[in-house]
Image (cartoon, rainbow, N blue to C red):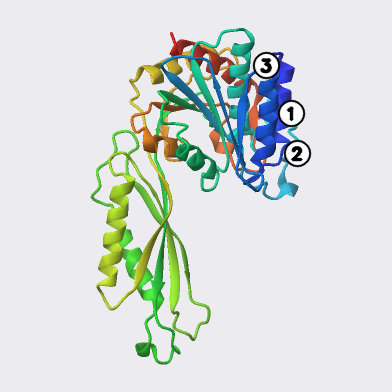
Amino acid sequence: MEEKEKIKILQDLIQINSVNGNELEVAEYLHKLFAKSNLESKVDEFGDRRANLVLDVGQSEKVLGLTGHMDTVVLGNEDKWSYPPLEAKIDGDRLYGRGAADMKSGLAALAIAIIELSDLGKIPGHIRFIATAGEEYGTPGANRLRDLGVAKDLDALVVGEATNGDIIYAHSGSFNYRIVSHGKSVHSSTPELGNNALDALVDFAAIERTLFDDVPRDPYLGELKHSVTILNVGEQVNTIPDEGELYGNIRPTSAFNNKQIVERLKSAVDEVNDKNGAKLTFELIHDWYPVVSNPEDDFVQTALTVSQEVFSNYVEGKQPELITMNGATDASVFVKDNTNLPVIILGPGESNVSHQIDEYTTISSYLALVEIYKQIILRYFE
C-alpha cells in the first residue's frame, strides 16, 4: 500500500464523527477496507449506531489479538482549534484532528498491517483484530465482546493506544464508585430534628483520605492512587439536606486489586453507618482491572526489540523503551477472563496530546507503527 493511501485511510477515519458513539460508521468503513483484500470481518451492531468489529484471519494454535477503539472524546471548543477537529488537516509531519492520537492512528495502523501481510500472502498465524465501541466512557463494546468470549482464547494482545513507540507493559485499572447518603430534611433553625446527609459524606471522605495508606506498593505500578472527586449535596442554604452523593475514583493495581478495594470501601461505609444513625449506600459504577505483564516476557521483549529497530528509521532521535502508566484501556475488560494474558500497549503519536485541543499524531510515527505491527505479528508466530 502506498504511503498516500495509508494517510488517506487515517484521514477518512478522523473525518467520521464518532464522539462517544457512532462507531457503526467507522466499523462499516473498516469492514469495506478489509473486504477489498478479501478479508471477511463481522460488524457487531448493538443499537443507536453503536458497533464493534471483529476480524479473524489465519490459522494456528496461538491467537494474537490486536485491538483499538473507534470512539473519541468530545471535540471541545472548536474555535480554539488551529484546524477544524474533523478535517484531518496535515501540517508538516503532523496530522491534526480529534482521535488522531487517541486512537484512530493506532486503529488504522493495526488494520493496514494485517491488510499488507494478507495481500503478500504472509499471514503467519491466527490473528484477531478487535475494534471496540465506547472505550472512552463505560466500555460497552469491550464488555459486550467479553460476554461473547472474544478474548478468552487469546494468547497475547496488542493495544494500539498512543505511546510514540514506547512499550507499556503494565497499567492500572480504573474503579469508579458512588456513595449515596440518606438523611432527613428540616429547617436549618432546628437541625437537631433532622439528619444532615452531608455529615455522613464528610465522615466518609475523611476516612477515605487514609483508607488505603497500608496497602502494598505494586512493583510495577507503584502506589495505589485514590481520590474523592465529586460531592453533590444540598439545594438551599437554610435547609438541612436529606440526600447527597459522593463520587470517587481509584486506580487498582495487582498488589491491591478491585475485589479488595470493594471490601475496603464497604467497610468504611459500615463504619460511618454505625455512627450517628447515618445511612450510606455503596454503588459500583465502573470496574476496570489492572493489566500487568512481566517486562521480561518474550512477547514484551520482542515488541521492544522491533520498535527499537524500526522506529528510529522513521523518527530521528527516538529510542523506544519499556514504561508503565496509570490510565486504563479495553484490555482491563479483556483480562477479566484471561488474567495471565500478556498485554502490551504500543501505538503512534504522543499520549499527552490525547483529549486536548489541537490533538495530533505524527505521520512519521504512524507509518513506523504499520511496519512495527507487521514485524511483531511475524515474529510472534516464528
Q: Is residue 162 above or below residue 71?
A: above
Residue at 48% across, 85% down:
239
Mark before the other along the chain sequence, 2 or 3: 3
Q: Position of residue 271 (x, y in %)?
A: 25, 67
Q: CA distance from mark 1 to mark 3?
A: 31 Å
Amino acid found under the numbered disc labelled 3: Ser
Q: CA distance from mark 2 to mark 1?
A: 10 Å
- The quarter of the rendered structure image containing the C terminus is top left
Residue 202 is at least partly visible in this image: no
Mark before the other along the chain sequence, 2 or 1: 2
- Name the element at disc 3: loop
Residue beneath label 3, please? Answer: 37
Q: Is residue 237 above or below residue 355?
A: below
72 or 63, which lies in front? 63
Q: CA distance from mark 2 to mark 3?
A: 33 Å
Residue at 39% across, 40% down:
172
Amino acid found under the numbered disc labelled 2: Tyr
Residue beneath label 1, please? Answer: 91
Disc 2 to disc 1: CB gap under 8 Å: yes
85 or 116, which lies in front? 116
Q: Position of residue 263 (x, y in %)?
A: 28, 54
Disc 1 to disc 3: CB gap under 8 Å: no
Q: Residues within 10 Å of mark 1 (few under 14, many from 20)?
A: few
Amino acid found under the numbered disc labelled 1: Asp
Residue beneath label 2, please? Answer: 83
